[in-house]
Structure formats: structure tokens, C-alpha cells
Amino acid sequence: MSLKKIYELINRFMPAIVGLCIILESAFFLIATPPGHIPDVWAHVYRVSGIINGDVVVKPVHARSMLQNVSSGAVGGTVDCAWLDYSLAQYDGYDPAVALLESLPSDACANTSSGTVDLPYNNAGINSPVAYTPQIIGVAAGKLFGLSASTTYRLAEIIMLAVYAVFMFLAVNALRTWRVPIGVLLSLPPIVKRASFAFSADSFTQAVVLLFSCLLIREILGPRGIMRHVWQLAVVGLVMAMCKFIYVPLVLLMLPLMWASQCSGQQVMIFSRKRAVPVLGSITLCAAWIMFWLKINDWYTTTPMLVSYGQMNAHKHALLTQPTVMLDAVHDILWSILHAQANLNNASDHRGIAVCWMLIACILLELFIASVMQFGTRFIQANPQTAAKQDTHVTHKSPNLLYLWVIALFCIGIILLTYLALWLQYNPADSLGVNGVQYRYFLPLAVLFGFVFLETAKQTQLNLFQLRPHAAITRGRAGR
């Protein structure tokens, strides 16, 4: 069997290969990760229990945690006492979001017929219930069938793992171009580890963002005559915005998809009203949701022990009105990027952040080189003598380089907005850099960055191919 046939076979079964790889990797990481060894896990656990008990929006609570150890400013919800007991039993110094037992009355659970207690989780309060869909299903099922907290915790992780694997199968299955390299990217252990099964809002969010990215690539490169594909993209985009508002800018990348060719192979794109309905509808609903959700959650801060609500508001006001504060923010963010500053100076996060920024820099350099080459190619094509020598049979349906620039800059903008949010909510006065950055914040954008890299490399190759006739003519003239 030839290498081409082997590649075609791998390409055909890549969705199943990716799904299987993710299940096996995730199962290994799930078994190897003790309960409670996920960033902010107890805040997420308390948040899910609070949502099931009716606290969709957080409320002020008197209890404290190691992370929210303040006399005022703690917010949370009504949590089942079983989760309090389980988190205290599993706590080994890893996650400071665990509740402080001394901040609760000694008979806090004994005095409630419902077996619940109000616990704080400021840093998870901003997450909407949508971001916890798999965990809510798991915890609700455990509560319904009377399972122990330990069993329910593992059940929620297994459900998250199954959802993540299905989403990645659907993501790769949607692709017709770049299926193998993007499938390999999605199967890399740094991307799969924790995010594929973790009891966290970030797990489902990452799955949705990666699925949205692949559906977007399908629409960019594929034929735009299938309306259900646009509706699928629009719905997933809305779910993505409801998971985490920081990814809302990505839905704007759907705007060029409102244009489509009337027939197969036609190069002229015309505005399609049918395609505009789901695209504009999704963007409008995303904007409405974000305004609503931020409005009902704008009265508290995520870490009052580091930055109080008053300090955060003063920070935001000064950022918009005082140029010196804006310059301080830019300086701190740039310093943090250049030094690959990580949360709590974690060594693995530091290395991961450094690698991510170096890869992004390489992609931007590649885009710049490709743009210069494309300019040169167009200049040569304008010359009749060299244009006649061009090979006109080279065809490759690729997005405009400008669109690739927009995708890359939108992704970088989302990362910078994350830095800014951390600067506002985690940085005490006069601190240097940006606290709280983790390399996992880069991972949901991996597919879009990978797509930009692959398409730019392809266009660079085509530009080189088209420049060869001109180089031959130039050498011929030099020889004469």
C-alpha cells in the first residue's frame, strides 16, 4: 500500500482515531489525578451544587475559604453538606478554594433540614450554568440516586470525559481539509490533560471553543451552500458565548460567511440573506446574553482578598480616564508576557506560557513573510511578460491572508483581554506584572492558531511556486 493510500485511510478514520485517543488519554489522566487536584476545583464543585440548589446567581455569604478569607465581599450559594465534608476530607494543600471550617458554626449542617450550608466561591460565580452542563448532569444524577460525594465526583468527571470525546469527534469529522494535522493537535497530551475530564467550567468551555473552531474552518474552506452547517456554527457560537464571555469576539469571525457563491466553482461572492439570518441572529443573542449576564454579576469581585470590589471599580475607572494607569496596565501586561509570568510562579505553567508565546510569534512572522510574498506575486502578475509564464492550473481554495490576520489578531486579543481581566481582579496595588496567568488559557485557541499556521504555510508554498517563472526569466536576462 502506498503512502498516499495510507494517508487517505488515516484521513478517513481520523475522527474515530481522535475520539479513541482522547478517551484513552483522558482515562489515564483521570485515574492519575487525585480528587481535588484541579485548579479551583472546590469553587467549581460548590458552584455546581449551588446551581442545583437554586443559586444560579451568587449571593453574599458569611462563610470564608482560604482564597476568600475576608470579613466582607465573599459570595457563593447554598451547597450540600456532603460536598463540604468531601472537600475537607480530600484537601491536602492543593486548592485554596476549600471552605474554612472555622468560619462556619459548629452545627451549621446539623441545624438545616435540607442538609445544606452557604459556602463562598467568588472566582467561580461569574461562570454561567451552561459552562457546567456535564457536571450539573453528573451531580444531579448523583443526588437523585443517593450516591456518595466521592462516587458523584467521579461520575461527573466521566460524563465530562464522554462529552469532550464526542465533541472532538464531531469537530474533526466536520473538517474536510487539514483533518489529520488538526486531529493530531487535538490529541496532544497538553491539550487533553485535565481539560478533557476536569470538574471545571473550563473543560466544557474548551470543548465548545474547539468545536466552534473546526465548524468555522469547515465554512471558511468548504462549500457554503449547506444551510444546516451555518445554523450549527451559529448555535455552537451562542453556547460558546454563554460558557465564557471572553470568547465572544470569535463569533464576529462568522460575519464573512454571510457571503457565498451562487454556484459551485464561482469566484464572485454575493451576500446571502439566508446565511445572514443565523449569523446575525447568533451575534445579536451573544451580545444580549453578555450584557445581561455581566449586568447581574457586576456587584462583586473574584478575589476580594487580593483586590476588593471598591479597588477593582477604581482600577476600571482609572483605566478609562487616566492615561498613566492605562500605560501601567500595558507595561504590566508586556512585562508579564516577556517574562512568561505564571500563577504562583509555577514552573510548568511558566514553560507552557513561554512556548505558547514563542509559537504565536512564529505564526505572526510567518504571516508577515507570506504577506510580503503575496504582494510580490501580485506585482509580478501585473507584468504581462511574467504573467504569461505563470502556471494557471494551480488551484487551492484558501482564505484571504487578511482573514488569516484577523483570525490571529482576534485570538491574540482574547489572550490580552484575559491578561487585562487578571490585572484588574488579581493584581494588588503596586504589584509588578499580571498575577494568575496559566498556560491552559491559551489551549482553547490552539485550533485557530494551527489553522492560520497551516493555511499560511500553504499559501507561502503557492507563492513560491508562482515566483519561479519570474526567477527563471530574471536569470535568463542576466545570462544574456
Image (cartoon, rainbow, N blue to C red):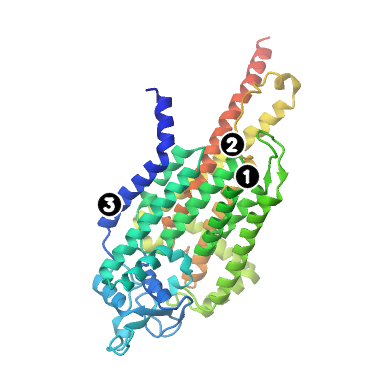
Say which quadrant the N terminus sits in: top left
Residue 234 visible in the shown view: yes
Give the amino acid type for the residue marked by disc 1 in the picture: Tyr
Residue ID at (64%, 33%): 374
Above or below, comparing residue 252 to residue 148 in the picture: above
Q: Amino acid at mark 3?
A: Phe
Residues at discs 3 and 2 in contact (Cβ within 8 Å): no
Query: Vertical placement of 382 versus 20: above or below?
Result: above
At x 33%, y 61%, the residue is: 157
User: Left of 471 or right of it: where is 202?
Assistant: left
Q: Are marks 1 and 2 in contact (CB under 8 Å)?
A: no
Task: Quickly name the residue at label 2.
Answer: 369
Q: Which residue is mark 3?
A: 28
Q: Amino acid at mark 2?
A: Ile
Q: Secondary structure at mark 3?
A: helix
Q: Which mark is residue 403?
A: 1
Q: Earlier in the sequence, mark 3 or mark 2?
A: 3
- The spot of residue 269 in percent (x, y) is 71, 41
Distance between the Cα atoms at labels 1 and 2?
A: 15 Å
Dot 2: few (<14), some (14–19), or many (≥20) neighbours within 10 Å? some
Instruction: Name the residue: 33% across, 50% down.
Output: 23
The tag earlier along the polypeptide, 1 or 2, is 2
